[in-house]
Amino acid sequence: MNKKPFVTLEQLEEITKTYPTPFYLYDEKGIRENAKALKEAFSWNPGYKEYFAVKATPNPFLINILREYGCGCDCSSMTELMLSHEIGVTGEDIMFSSNDTPAEEFAYAAEIGAIINLDDFTHIDFLEKTIGYIPETISCRFNPGGIFQISNDIMDNPGDAKYGMTEEQLFDAYRILREKGAKHFGLHAFLASNTVTNEYYPMLAKVLFELAVRLKKETGADIRFINLSGGIGIPYRPDQEANDIRIIGEGVRRVYEEVLVPAGMGDVAIYTELGRFMMGPYGCLVTKAIHEKHTYKEYIGVDACAVNLMRPAMYGAYHHITVMGKEDAPCDHVYDVTGSLCENNDKFAIDRPLPKIDKGDLLVIHDTGAHGYAMGYNYNGKLKSAELLLKEDGGVQLIRRAETPKDYFATFDCFDIIKGLV
Ligand SMILES: *Cc1c(COP(=O)(O)O)cnc(C)c1O
């Protein structure tokens, strides 16, 4: 598949007159169309709700677009809870799926009425001691251990993951939570990340639905929702085929009819906590080639670095790159595309065949709309970029300004020595 940017060179030339590179650009049209398709794919389930995984793209402007399609927020930390609450997401429209959770975060989540999803058996006690009661609605996270596979393909390795409770712990947790006053239950699991197959959700659904039937039978718990969490992936590479959310929704429906309905559980709501699938393809990092270096390899130095996008450095992740204006030129050069960190893994691409790049060329780094900006950091004193929204009408809106040195030095404001800088 030919991966095409959602923005043209002409548009970028116009945008860069106002906003210097590097910056993140998001595609309102793409975000809307995808959110609508997700909603439709699960419309067979009356209680269905997507809780957008805020950690993927914690920008209120983007989250507000998703809210128009009925999405809530899935939070993993205090500031994500604060952000969601601040923009008016309330009560059970907030899911708190966290792990190794600090007491003050449980306390705040309870205060704003979020649904708490317990990662561990010991958190029952910890939560009760922290807030003084067990909420009426509560969820537990399951980890089946072992490896999770679809036919012969290993999807991921839950047995190696720090998250969730064993099956035995889960049954005990439901019993104890009931004794302590919980009335309505949720069941959650996240067993594989960035799956590019339509089979992951239906397979996960089968595991969770069958477990839910047994949990209900053996503990008497009223199971209100099953949370399939995140994990639906996107095709980062041009040779990958995108998931079809309609097929995924239909696959989950079939398992629902097969397992839950006959067990008298045809009123259970399906929840999802997608992050990558909601935003990944609808954001890109725009950067400019500023240097060319010929040593033992050919390097193109750009004005973005791993601080702006950590995934290649952290996971060796592939992000497709388009050299704007050279879409149809032959990829007859092989480059390492690097940032300026004093860190040799600061490379957006290694040995990548690309058209000849000239200084001043604009590069679009694809599929950075989720886990992109959000993972940024400040190593080497580098500053985070701006985030811009390409509106449906073609206009551009600044949805987060770039950091300035003042932001970087702000945490020294208590020291006289640095006063001049802040
Ligand atoms: C990260 C995360 C998600 C979102 O994952 P994606 O791969 O972006 O869909 C959802 N739920 C939990 C608990 C997470 O940690």
Image (tube, rainbow, N blue to C red):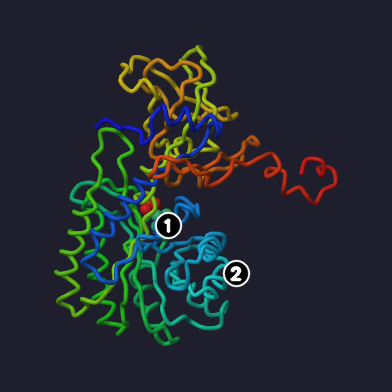
Q: Quadrant of residue 183?
A: bottom left
Report the residue that reaches farthest toward the right.
416
The percent position of residue 42, horizontal first and vertical second, equals 24, 62
The answer to which of marks 1 and 2 sits earlier in the sequence is 1
The percent position of residue 380, horizontal first and vertical second, equals 64, 34
Label 2 crowd bin: few (<14), some (14–19), many (20+), radius 10 Å: few
Relative to 140, residue 147 above or below: above
Residue pointed to by mark 2: 104
What's the residue at 29%, 67% (across, down)?
48
Q: Quadrant of residue 170?
A: bottom left
Query: Closest to the observer: 152 or 270?
Result: 270
Nearest to viewer (mark 1 / mark 2)? 1
- Mark 1 to mark 2 CA distance (whole Å): 21 Å
Label 1 crowd bin: few (<14), some (14–19), many (20+), radius 10 Å: many
In the picture, the disc for residue 53 is 1
Say which element carries label 2: helix
Q: If the picture is divided into quarters, which one holds ligand 1?
A: bottom left
Query: Closest to the observer: 75 or 185?
Result: 75
What's the residue at 49%, 72% (across, down)?
123
Mark 1, ligand 1, within 8 Å: the answer is: yes
